[in-house]
Image (tube, rainbow, N blue to C red):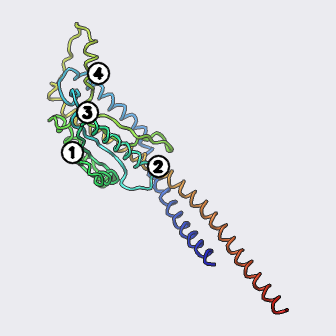
Amino acid sequence: MAIARDLSYKITSLSNMQKVMSAMNMIASTKLRKLLMRQPVLKQFSTLVDSIGDDLISGLRSFESPLIHAPDKIRNSHIIVITADKGLCGSHNSSVLRALTKTWQEENQQGVAVDLTCIGARARNLCRRRDFKVCHGIDSNEQHISDTVLREIAFEIVERVKRGEVDKVVIIYNHFVSTLVQKTQQLQIFPLIQEKEFNKEQSGRSSQETEAETEPRPEDFILPAANLYLYYKLKIALTDSYLSEHAARMTAMEKAKTNAEDLINRYVKIRNRARQDTITSELIEIVAGTEALNN
């Protein structure tokens, strides 16, 4: 009976876990449904921001700025990594953290110094354990990260690029494709164009082509434009990460609930067999005792 009692404890525990998984699944589904209503607008806005970035490149191509052109050698890189604050969301956090670790190792092998902005408790905890250099660390939930905080982060990073303290800015996050598919993306923000690409296009330009004039002057325009561009990119990546997180959590909880149901059924069968074996043994002992008394 001890085996049957242990199995009953496991079945009860799994049933309680199943209730928690169902509740988490429902919460993630509700949040995902609300965010999905914003996805078409998010796609349009993301396309518009990319178009503005292309306009910046074409209009300011000849303007010398570390925000536009890459230096001959990248010495300092800044990575913005976005994860969730909590787990139980499948590979949402682990895929981003694997990409971060791989990029950090590749940059270090090339002699590039890397510092980080961690948005999300999971990213911050990993960087703390591995002694990565973290400039900003903040939770990704809406109670902690507001538009004001994002603007401040964007402003400080752009200022560092302008002063030459950072040569490259990269965002690593999960991009929402569908409810079942999320892809980890690594997106370079600054510099807007690579030096090799610029030299190639410069060599192919006609000698009769004239330079475009911009109003206001590039030196007055580039800094506020870069601040807004990075802020909007962070906002888009953060919303995309929210979508991916809740979709991954909903899928993970649904699978966990199904697995718990399978385990419960298996343990019920094993418990029933154990009870039958106990009953059979007791019946055999009774019959054997009766026969011994009759003899």
**Amino acid under disc 2:** Ala
Closest to the observer, 136 or 266 = 266
Q: Which label is found at residue 170?
A: none
Q: CA distance from mark 3 to mark 4?
A: 14 Å
Circle 1 or circle 2, nearest the eye: 2
Return the x and y of residue 264 as percentages of the image width and height: 60, 64
**Amino acid under disc 4:** Glu
Q: Of callouts 1 and 2, which one flags the residue occurring earlier in the amino acid sequence?
A: 1
Q: Which class describes the residues within 10 Å of circle 1: few (<14), some (14-19), or many (20+)?
A: some
Q: CA distance from mark 3 to mark 2?
A: 30 Å
Q: Of callouts 3 and 2, which one flags the residue occurring earlier in the amino acid sequence?
A: 3
What residue is disc 4 on?
A: 197
Circle 1 or circle 4, nearest the eye: 4
Indicate the secondary structure of the residue bearing disc 3: strand
Return the x and y of residue 11 as percentages of the image width and height: 58, 69
Return the x and y of residue 57 as percentages of the image width and height: 26, 24
Kindly give the residue lying farthest to the top in the view shown: 208
Indicate the secondary structure of the residue bearing disc 4: helix
Using the image, determine if residue 100 lies above or below residue 71.
Answer: below
